[in-house]
Image (tube, rainbow, N blue to C red):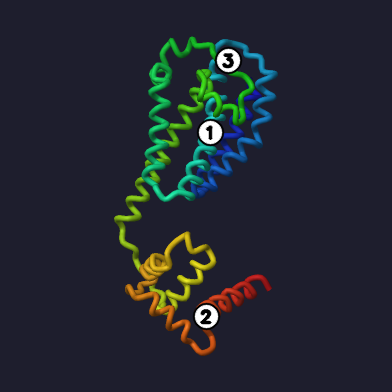
Amino acid sequence: MKKMISLNQIFFDRLTKIEKDKYCHIESAIKIQNLYFEFVNDYLAFEQKIVFKSKRDEERYFTEIKPSFIAHFIYARKILEIEAALASASDFDKIIAFEQSKILHFKEKNFELSKAYQNKTGQFAQMENYSSGIYDDQVFKELSRTLTFDLFIAFYKAYEKIEIYLLELKFNKTKQFTQPIIPLEVPFTKTEIAELSYAIQELKGKRAISVKHLASKLGAVFGVEAFNIYDAFRDIGNRDQNKTILLNKLQSALLIKIDNKYK
């Protein structure tokens, strides 16, 4: 049991470092998931060999150590799943509401377990329905069945963190739409904004965003007043020689920077 506690401490020390580094949600989830896979075989090996010296040691393993470890795997996988859904869909509020409803359903479905776990009652402490060897994607399949108590705790802990993550997403979205964009003091002309907007749209695909909307966003960032982008694009097309003045300047400036940095 001491070796398991020591292994668990090493995992959580590494985990704490990831969380302190303030990665974005996706980067953090990927790093947590990779850390989990780095340690999972060791946890599984210990579980197969472990001999509990007391009932308290066994209870601590199945209600604290194992669930806490698996909870971070569940959390990371759910974050990646939600972020992927948000990236491929336009209805932000619908996705957030759907994920929140799934957590609510989990709590309602397991109401008695939740109540016993929250209150740390004797009823929960005496439960003996624990699982062995479940450390992979099989954990998600258990949701459609009756959860073993260690996996229930893992999901409970993970969903507590996911609830906070979903609230942060909603708060950041509200903040994004309520705080005005402070323009950068970088001199850009309307024609340059048009040139940049059309280049980005053509590179990333016309269905991704309208050029008018893109020009509006870039104009707000660089302090350029609203203008008719189609007229500006016509001016670009009417240039006699160099039709991509800004893009050429950007390329030259970046290449000089790279050459100076990595000579």
Q: In the image as oriented, which residue stretches furthest toward the left?
A: 178
Residue at 37% over, 41% down: 167
Instruction: Tell me whether the residue at label 1 lies in contact with that at label 3, contact meaning CB atoms closer than 8 angstroms.
Output: no
Alpha carbon separation for disc pair 1 and 3? 23 Å
For this view, does 95 lie left or right of residue 140? Answer: left
Residues packed near mark 1 inside 10 Å, few (<14), some (14 to 19) or many (20 plus): many
**Residue for badge 3:** 58
Instruction: Tell me whether the residue at label 1 lies in contact with that at label 2, contact meaning CB atoms closer than 8 angstroms.
Output: no
| Residue type, numbered disc 1 | Ile
Alpha carbon separation for disc pair 1 and 2? 49 Å
Residues packed near mark 3 inside 10 Å, few (<14), some (14 to 19) or many (20 plus): some
Q: What element does badge 2 sit on?
A: loop
Whichever of labels 1 and 2 marks the residue nearer the N terminus, that label is 1
| Residue type, numbered disc 2 | Thr
Q: Is residue 236 above or below residue 13?
A: below
Residues packed near mark 2 inside 10 Å, few (<14), some (14 to 19) or many (20 plus): some
- Residue 189 in percent (x, y) is at 40, 79
**Residue for badge 1:** 74
**Residue for badge 2:** 244
For this view, does 161 lie left or right of residue 252? Answer: left
Whichever of labels 1 and 3 marks the residue nearer the N terminus, that label is 3
For this view, does 34 lie left or right of residue 206? Answer: right
Alpha carbon separation for disc pair 2 and 3? 70 Å
Dot in front, 1 or 3: 1
Quadrant containing the C terminus in the rendered view: bottom right
Residue 165, by quadrant, is top left
Dot in front, 2 or 3: 2
| Residue type, numbered disc 3 | Glu
